[in-house]
Image: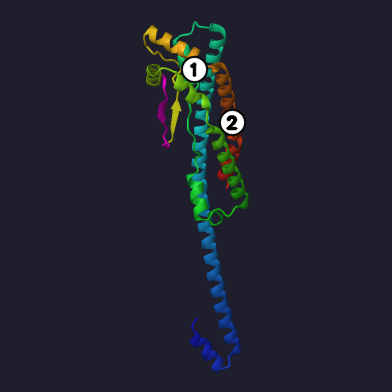
Amino acid sequence: MSIRRISEHIKEQNWFAVWLDLVIVFLAVFIGLQADNWNQERIAKQTAKTYYARLIGDLQAEQSSRDAREIYYKQTKRHAESAIKALRTSGKNLGEEFLIDVYQATQRWNYAPQRTTYDELISAGIANAIPDVEIRSRLANLYVNLIQSKITLEEPTPFRDKLRHEMLHEVQSKIREQCGDRFVFRANGVYHLELPEVCDLDIEPELIEEAVQGLLDYEDLAKDLARQISILDVKLGSLSAIKQPIREMVELLASR
């Protein structure tokens, strides 16, 4: 509808035609704006769904990582418990199995939350990408919990440094070679650590005896092992506590 046509109707004093032309213009503008709003809303919904899918992938990777860590630290704890039991019951009749147990009790798996997508959303303006207030709030709370979990899982264990300071280097090297961490890469590119259930050091009895004697001279070894078990319990508790919130967040994102 051209301005010239409206001007002609005004000159002719055809007020009905003028009003009709104006109504048509207003309707055209309104429909155009409404169509643009609908298109923007459609794009926003599609963008949110794309981010939801990526967040689900991150959280599933997080859950897989935490499950693997739980297995890892339960195994580490079993080694610590076996070592402290051997100290209390076997006296000086300790051997290769004790050396493996006490060393494996010091194992640690560094942790970082799977939050690539969430960090991208924060830097780009999460309110624009995810308009759903409930989801934004629950995501924020979940990632705060993951940060707290990181602090717990990264808590230093003095026993690790003390034990590795006291144990013969040759024995430590053999344990790392035969019984150390195994890297397992998953399809999503995330790696997991695993400890072998059984291993054989195949070292001379004299070296084993020397290593055992050195650890028997380690003051407060049993107490430090008990403290290590306590720390491992806290780590396992942290790993387990956030499982349900992660599952619920994945279910919520999948439902939107």
Q: Nearer the viewer, residue 214 or 186?
A: 214
Residue 119 is tagged as none
Q: Which quadrant of the figure has residue 150?
A: top right
Q: Residues within 10 Å of mark 2 (few under 14, many from 20)?
A: some
Q: Is residue 42 above or below residue 214?
A: below
Query: At 50% across and 16% down in the image, what residue appears?
Result: 218
Q: Which residues are magenta?
A: 179-189
Q: Position of residue 140 (x, y in %)?
A: 59, 47
Q: Position of residue 199 (x, y in %)?
A: 42, 15
Query: At 55% across and 70% down in the image, what residue appears?
Result: 31
Q: CA distance from mark 1 to mark 2?
A: 25 Å
Decide whether residue 183 is among the magenta residues: yes
| Residue type pointed to by label 1 | Val
Of discs 1 and 2, which sits in the foreground? 1
Mark 2, residue position: 240
Horizontal side of 170 relative to 55 (left or right) equals: left
SS under mark 1: helix
Mark 1, residue position: 102
SS under mark 2: helix
Q: Nearer the viewer, residue 63 or 31?
A: 63
Q: Which quadrant of the figure has residue 250?
A: top right
